[in-house]
Amino acid sequence: MIVVGVVVVAFTGVVGASSFSTSASNSEVNGSFEVVPTGLVGVNIGDEAPNIIMNNPKGKELSDLRGSIVLIDFWASWCGPCRRENVNVVKAYEKYRKAKFKNADGFEIYSVSLDSKIPLWEAAIKKDNLLWDYHVSDLKKWNNEAAAMYGVSSIPMSFLVDEDGVIVAKNLRGFELHRHIDKHVKSLK
């Protein structure tokens, strides 16, 4: 059963007017292509990912997953491209859920649904075999507060967050998702 309730969106730091800027200064990358944290809370690469607090069966919020590599996946049961990409997301979960990471405790997926009907949402989770524990929604479709905070204007949309809560990649699909997670893997089991 999926529990849905009031959504509280919380930032985990101080946000200035420029924290959601798309300027290059907020997504600096050094010469070895490692992400350099900006020290800002925002949705650019290098920014600390804003916390998402939504009710779900496990009572977890995004910040509870600190220490793990986390894929924040925005999707909906009514979205054809999302449903097709779910095949790849499931493969990533199966591949990395038991992997050993260089600096992280593990790999988790935090699915944020833009659905409005619980039965359709639950049926899609079951049919697409989305076996991870973290499925959240406020049932507001495009008015989803987390989607607005993350600037999601189309789905599927994803954010890869490192063990420190820093966004290291965005909008990953297919092989690119695996390629970016592989950068953090020490060994696959």
Image (cartoon, helix red, strand yellow):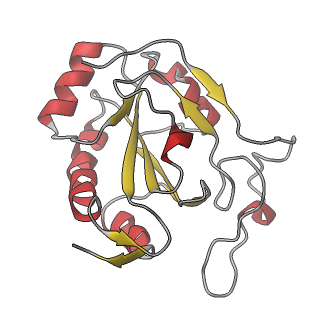
Position of 59 with respect to 148 (left or right) is left
Q: Quadrant of the N terminus?
A: top left
Residue name at image x 22 percent, y 40 percent = 130
Q: Nearer the viewer, residue 166 or 76?
A: 166
- Residue 135, relative to residue 4: is it above or below? below
Position of 80 with respect to 48 (left or right) is left
Residue 117: quarter of image: top left
Q: Nearer the viewer, residue 187 or 15?
A: 187
The image position of residue 22, as x and y in percent, is: 73, 54
Q: Nearer the viewer, residue 103 or 85?
A: 103
The image position of residue 143, as x and y in percent, is: 54, 20
Position of 129 with respect to 184 (left or right) is left
Residue 128: quarter of image: top left
Q: Quadrant of the C terminus?
A: bottom left
The number of callouts visible is 0
- Residue 164, relative to residue 80: is it above or below? below
Position of 8 with respect to 141 (left or right) is right
The image position of residue 42, as x and y in percent, is: 70, 47
Residue lying furthest bottom: 31
Residue name at image x 62 percent, y 57 percent = 166
Residue name at image x 53 percent, y 60 percent = 163
The image position of residue 68, as x and y in percent, is: 46, 56
Residue name at image x 40 percent, y 15 percent = 4
- Residue 37, relative to residue 7: is it above or below? below
